[in-house]
Image (cartoon, helix red, strand yellow):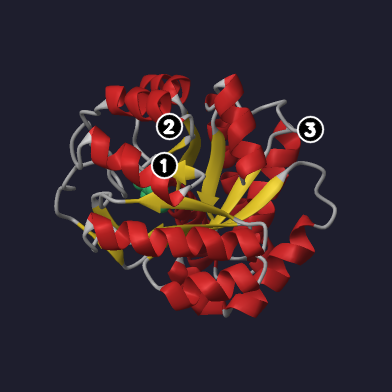
């Protein structure tokens, strides 16, 4: 993760981080990254880890990345549960987001420092968070507006924990935006200037092209996309199923092909938009 993000920060492009939900979406995202010759991040929510079981999910990822010739990293998204963090670190995840924003900052800092030490033992990296990102994603989070900490508190947290990446609340939110978001982009510039580490942009779905470009230029080297993948995948499925229902013809590969093509297009679009194309090494 650190290799991918430090390069992206230095060259000011964004690495797309897609919340994959199953084997088909993993394979489609990887195909998009290969087609764009781009590094990519596969993110798993805790819900997806629980749905498959850690061992089974890792086995699927492992099998699907085997012949992929671009840099890929496996990241655990928003996880407040230390047991799941430890399990994924032991089980081969390259990076984890320890989401302890519900704790007070001092306790969050203490526990995140432990998570960083634990991650280092397996060569893994850590994203830190001290402010909730608005919106519920895969059963984690809340619809309440985030309580934003001061720049001093955030910088102190980053320095003392040694996290590799940080997820700031800047007016962004998970899910579709109900109204156009007003973002505090300067906060990204201030955090990057003070700490030198890459920022993770959460709530990617629904931001404008200009917002992505501006935030990436300021240091959002990791750009999270979840809702767009889920909607693309399920709506593509719905199209095929409606047609199958009308014709009473049921062909699973036709469903999978259509969903795959839609997810590949969605992922390629975001990779290109974030400046990731041609950046693989
Ligand atoms: P969206 O669901 O808005 O794309 O946000 C993704 C995200 O930030 C995952 O943590």
Residue designated by label 2 = 195
The crowd level at tag 3 (other Cα within 10 Å; few <14, some 14-19, many 20+) is few
The crowd level at tag 2 (other Cα within 10 Å; few <14, some 14-19, many 20+) is some
- Nearest to the eye among marks 3 and 2: give it: 2
Q: Residue at x 25, y 29 (%)?
A: 183
Please determine whether, in this image, residue 198 is positioned above or below residue 68. above
Q: Are marks 1 and 3 in contact (CB under 8 Å)?
A: no
Residue designated by label 3 = 281
Q: Which residue is drawn at 82% across and 58% down?
A: 66
Can you tell which quarter of the image residue 89 is in? bottom right
Q: Residue at x 62, y 57 (%)?
A: 124
| Mark 2 close to ligand 1, CB under 8 Å | no
Q: Residue at x 60, y 21 (%)?
A: 11
Mark 3 and mark 2: span between their CA atoms? 26 Å
Q: Residue 49: where, in percent of width, then height?
A: 52, 72
Can you tell which quarter of the image residue 121 is in? bottom right
- Does residue 170 appear in the picture of this structure? no
Residue designated by label 1 = 159
| Mark 3 close to ligand 1, CB under 8 Å | no
Q: Are marks 2 and 1 in contact (CB under 8 Å)?
A: yes
Q: Residue 24: where, in percent of width, then height?
A: 64, 61
Counting residues from the N terminus, which is met first, the one under dot 3 or under dot 2?
A: 2
Q: Is mark 3 on a helix, strand or loop?
A: loop
Which quarter of the rendering shows the C terminus?
top right
Camera-nearest residue between 109 and 140? 109
The crowd level at tag 1 (other Cα within 10 Å; few <14, some 14-19, many 20+) is some
Counting residues from the N terminus, which is met first, the one under dot 1 or under dot 3?
A: 1
- Nearest to the eye among marks 1 and 3: give it: 1
Q: Is mark 1 on a helix, strand or loop?
A: helix
């Amino acid at each position: 993760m650190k290799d991918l993000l430090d390069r992206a920060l230095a060259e000011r492009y964004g690495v797309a981080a897609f919340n994959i939900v199953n084997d088909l979406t993993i394979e489609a995202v990887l195909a998009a990254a290969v087609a764009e010759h781009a590094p990519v991040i596969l993110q798993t929510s805790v819900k997806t880890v629980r749905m498959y079981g850690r061992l089974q999910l890792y086995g699927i990822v492992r099998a699907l990345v085997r012949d992929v010739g671009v840099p890929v990293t496996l990241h655990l998204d928003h996880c407040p549960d230390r047991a799941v963090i430890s399990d994924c670190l032991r089980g081969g995840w390259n990076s984890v987001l320890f989401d302890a924003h519900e704790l007070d900052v001092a306790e969050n800092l203490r526990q995140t420092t432990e998570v960083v030490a634990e991650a280092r033992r397996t060569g893994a990296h850590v994203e830190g968070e001290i402010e909730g990102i608005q919106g519920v994603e895969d059963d984690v989070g809340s619809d309440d507006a985030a309580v934003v900490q001061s720049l001093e508190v955030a910088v102190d947290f980053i320095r003392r924990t040694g996290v590799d990446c940080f997820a700031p609340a800047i007016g962004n939110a998970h899910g579709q935006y109900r109204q156009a978001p007003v973002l505090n982009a300067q906060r990204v510039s201030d955090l990057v200037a003070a700490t030198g580490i890459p920022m993770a942009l959460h709530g990617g779905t629904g931001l404008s092209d200009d917002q992505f470009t501006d935030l990436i230029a300021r240091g959002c080297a990791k750009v999270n996309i979840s809702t767009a993948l889920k909607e693309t995948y399920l709506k593509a499925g719905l199209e095929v199923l409606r047609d199958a229902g009308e014709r009473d013809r049921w062909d699973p590969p036709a469903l999978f092909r259509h969903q795959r093509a839609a997810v590949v297009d969605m992922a390629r679009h975001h990779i290109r938009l974030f400046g990731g194309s041609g950046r693989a090494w």
